[in-house]
Image (spheres, rainbow, N blue to C red):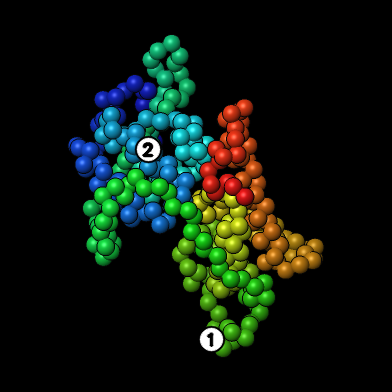
Amino acid sequence: MTVILSNADLSTYQSFSPFTSVDELNNAIRVHLYMNKHELTESAVAVFKLITQHAMKAVGVAFLKHEIIARQVGVSVSTVKRGIRVLKERNMIEVHRTTRRRGKIRGGYGHNVFVIVEPSADRSEMNDREEPKNPDAAYVQPEPKHTEALPFESSSLSEKKTSSTRKAAAGEQLDSSFVPAHVPRPFVLATKPFFDANGIYKLWGRAINAYNQASVEVNLKDHDIVQSLVGAFKGAMFMKKTGRLRKSLAGYFYGSCVRIFDRIYHQELEEIKQRLGREFRDDQLPRWYNR
């Protein structure tokens, strides 16, 4: 939910908060991280923790600009925006925009208002898991991104009209409805006219492998990232269907994915350099930027 507010409307900000004490807020932070951290990138976790650290003046509400978050976390503004979008999708925060209605400069957007969302009352998943033992779990250092490499051989990609020995032994092909849920739906829709569930799954594994080789932090379910990967697949399929492809489709797609993540790396590196200006040093980069 996005509401345009006055940039000095503190009473309205406070009314958004579901918390009446810092203890309630800290408990909510711990629950959010416990339930979601394993599905968030390192940068998204860092952004969330920074927001929570500023959510004390009005309990559960923080007032920050993207540029401030980027500088304090040590990432680019683009990374911050992606992280915020994921946090909203996970229902961990709400974001409200403000306009300047007071002071000498009026009009235009001011700072962002971030509201920590109260976790769902349904804790069934959490009840089945061990309670976090560390009361300061919300303030630990971000974890490095997890390696999720999947083995893939180009020869294992099978178009729907081609049957492999393994599938023949299994007795039937699996259609796209059997693709695991972690593979983004737009990618499945783009690939299913050409591949069955196994081929789609392994082709997505190529994208994951390319990401794990990259020195950048992104969420592979981010809309813009998924659309770029879909575009890479369509480009590879075009090359194949027009007879321009001199190597395997899987290899061509992998190379396109590598270039996508490399382009993001250089864009965000340039953004950090421009922000730091003459003060820029290599040791100021977050560790996932180091090659």
Label 2 crowd (10 A; few <14 / some 14-19 / many >=20):
many
Q: Position of residue 276 (x, y in %)?
A: 57, 30
Choose between 291 and 43: the one closer to the eye. 291
Q: Position of residue 212 (x, y in %)?
A: 57, 58
Question: Which amino acid does the dot numbered 2 rest on?
Answer: Ile
Q: Determine the image quadrant of residue 97.
A: top left
Q: Residue at x 59, y 50 (%)?
A: 215
Q: Residue at x 50, y 38 (%)?
A: 74
The residue that label 2 is drawn on is: 51
Question: Which amino acid does the dot numbered 1 rest on?
Answer: Ala
> Could you tell which of marks 2 and 1 lies nearer the N-terminus?
2
Q: As drawn, is 202 to the left or to the right of 100? A: right
Q: Position of residue 38 (x, y in %)?
A: 40, 57
Q: As drawn, is 139 to the left or to the right of 123? A: right
**In this rendering, is residue 163 above or below 159?**
below
Q: Residue at x 37, y 23 (%)?
A: 7
**In this rendering, is residue 267 above or below 39?**
above
Q: Residue at x 42, y 20 (%)?
A: 100
Label 1 crowd (10 A; few <14 / some 14-19 / many >=20):
few
Q: As drawn, is 187 to the left or to the right of 11? A: right
The label nearer to you, 2 versus 1, is 2
Q: Determine the image quadrant of residue 239.
A: bottom right
Say which element carries label 2. helix
Mark 2 vs mark 1, CA separation in Å: 51 Å
Q: Quadrant of the N terminus?
A: top left
The residue that label 1 is drawn on is: 170
Say which element carries label 1. helix
**In this rendering, is residue 9 above or below 244?**
above
Is residue 191 visible from the viewing direction of this image? no
